[in-house]
Image (cartoon, rainbow, N blue to C red):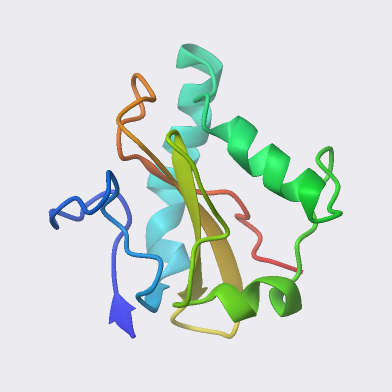
Amino acid sequence: MKKIKLNQNSETIIGGYILNPTEKYVINLAEEMEFQSAIMGSFQIMGRPPALKNYHAWLFENGFSVDAPNPTNEFVAPYYGVKPLWETEYSQGIVVKDENDSDYFIVMECSDKNKGYKHTQIILTLGGCM
């Protein structure tokens, strides 16, 4: 497992993205919350990135509520370090794990097609997966 801090990676961009969905990443959620809250606040000022539609499509295609997203740890765990949940020209969704417990999180990395959010890594399930 590789510990990372989101939005501070200076790794090589592979296929348009920094994060590698086949890598098992762990994060410290407590350390991520301030910056993630700022990103969510930027949605109010700059608008949501077009990539968010990719997440909504993934939720819908997998039978989860778009209005109250409810993916489960059990559903996303098989993707952890194996493959992306989705990958489009606008974003990829990967599963990361909290280093302090057994909870999984869905992180969306925006591609450079998202003005203002280029390579931004956003935790979409701030409360973890259910």
Residue occupying image coordinates x 49% and y 25% = 49
Q: Is residue 94 left or right of residue 71?
A: left
Residue 66 visible here? yes
Percent coordinates x, y for residue 32 in the rendering? 40, 57
User: Residue 76 falls in which quadrant of the image?
Assistant: bottom right
Instruction: Give the quadrant of the C terminus.
Output: bottom right
Q: Nearer the viewer, residue 6 or 20?
A: 20
Q: Is residue 61 above or below residue 75?
A: above
Quadrant containing the N terminus is: bottom left
Q: Position of residue 30 (x, y in %)?
A: 45, 64
- Name which residue lies at 29% across and 76% down: 3
Residue 100 place in picture, x, y as percent: 48, 83
Which residue is nearer to you in this view: 19 or 70?
19
Image vertical order of residue 52 relative to residue 104, above or below? above
Q: Please say if 18 is above or below 31.
A: above
Height in image: 104 above or below 56? below
